[in-house]
Image: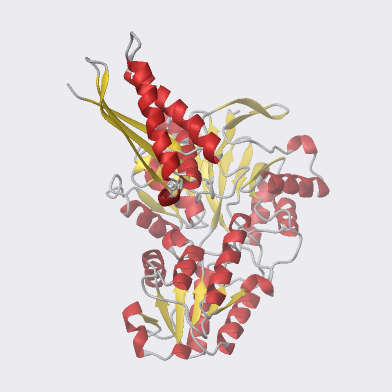
Amino acid sequence: MSDIKIMALGGVRENGKNLYVVEVNDSIFVLDAGLKYPENEQLGVDVVIPNLDYLIENKDRVQGIFLTHGHADAIGALPYIIAEVKVPVFGSPLTIELAKLFVKNSTAVKKFNNFHVIDSETEIEFQDAVISFFKTTHSIPESMGIVVGTDQGNIVYTGDFKFDQAARKYYQTDLARLTEIGSDGVLALLSDSANASSTEQTASEYEVGDEINNVIGDALGRVVVAAVASNLVRIQQVFDAAANHGRRVVLTGFDIENIVRTAIRMKRIHLADDQLLIKPKDMSRFEDHELIILETGRMGEPINGLQKMAVGRHRYVQIKEGDLVFIVTTPSIAKEAVVARVENLIYKAGGSVKLITQNLRVSGHANGRDLQLMLNLLRPKYLFPVQGEYRDLAAHASLAEEVGMFPENIYIVKRGDVMILEKDGFFHSGAVPASDVMIDGNAIGDVGNIVLRDRKVLSEDGIFIVAITVNKKEKKIVSRAKVSTRGFVYVKKSRDILRESAELVNTTVENYLAQGTFDWGELKGSVRDEVSKFLFDQTKRRPTILPVVMEVR
């Protein structure tokens, strides 16, 4: 019998960053390679990816990377993985094309071309397992679940999914295939939990399409639609509504342009009129009631783009009287406060706001009843709730118990936990590195807690810079202390504090130079400590203190 291990390097107790590892004997199969966008406190960070140390250390055993769909939470970390672990990448035609866009934008791996297109009929035989796929419904075409077939039963990873009986072609779930997989025997199920805490029926995409069509049809002026760039079902609905009401669509971002052009080329998005899409520079040729502006923002985050429009800093568009801003994405809980502030700015600029969630329950993820249906179709022996915060994973576990699963067969794991199959189930067997790796520009992993803490302090209390020149040999001050500050106090009203700070630095340095020993680090530390205490006593703030001690020889 095969030795089997399952671990999550991301995607558990968090939203996004999906990356799951299934080991069968000496073979490693990587399921998804996602990233997530930073939380509010991760200042200056572009994206967050999983820790890849385990895969890099065991790269000779990795058989391939298998992708479920083309969203960033499933493919975004791919360039960082294949820069170190050059293995085949498998996915549906559209998923592979979108993955290539991510790879092409990375100079380190843009020449990588070991991509393999699969479909729901594909079976790939490896030495220790057989990999196959099944169609699922999500907000992007050609979403797939993955089956790792072993001699102890199937290990099934659903990817992001929901059930929608009115789903269009390329979005439809293959229920017969799911039943077949369940009949073959499912050892373990790794199942999407992002919407597990809801038992409300989500609107079908047919109903969502009707709502979008009606809202755009009723609008009198320009409609600014805020959507996620890779939510292709929503973008298709906007295009359909535009065609129905004689409007042209303006794409305002580089990401959306690339994704939409790729989907059109592959016939996964259809345009009723070849003239439907226009360039931003051509907007002036049309009346307001003839325009839809599709805003997806940088890296698919539309809310920041709306804020720029509202305050007049957007590259192409400024919100004006009569504009309707239609938000057709469901903001995450972390973004709710931001959305509320942006709404206020839009109204101040003369526009109005409508959210699709005001009338409909919209989600690309399975609700509680859908999750139970998946459990009943597949009938797994063991369940690993994945893709969601802890509350979502716990809700999924409760739903599984309702349909008859034993609590001891349900595992809510932490990132990095190594779960090994033994006679009586999966058992925890240590852990591998699974911390967040933060990407800031071209820098990978050099932004840690200390850097983020410094950025937080700088953003809240500012910086206080002290410069002084000394003669180490003669043990005297050559140029007395000068201070400057940014983001700490208003200089014109705080001259006394700055002057007293400079005098304190002079005194501290003189006292230190009078000692018998000399160490640059110790001297700077003394200056930093004394100034920090003084400033806190005066202002109750703790700015970052930066002592600059120069030497004259």
Image color mode: secondary structure
* Foreground of the two, 515 or 291: 515
Residue displayed at 65% across by 55% down: 178
The percent coordinates of residue 284 (x first, y second) are: 35, 87
Asked if one can make out residue 32 in the rendered structure from this viewpoint, the answer is: no
Q: Position of residue 278 (x, y in %)?
A: 36, 81
Q: Residue at x 47, y 78 (%)?
A: 319
User: How far from the left and from the top, in percent, is residue 433?
Assistant: 51, 30
The image quadrant where one finds the C terminus is top left
**How many numbered markers are drawn?**
0
Single out the residue that lies furthest toward the left: 553
Considering depth in this image, is 325 or 501 the residue closer to the camera?
501
Residue occupying the point 41% across, 67% down: 256
Is residue 397 found left or right of 231 in the rendered image?
A: right
Quadrant in the rendering for residue 514: top left
The residue drawn where x is 46% and y is 36% is 448
Q: Is residue 265 visible?
A: yes
The residue nearer to you, when weighing 406 against 545, is: 545
Is residue 61 placed above or below 251 in the rendered structure?
above
2, above or below 330, in the image: above
Residue 401 located left or right of residue 40: right
Rendering coords of residue 37 (x, y %)? 50, 51
As drawn, is 378 to the left or to the right of 65? right
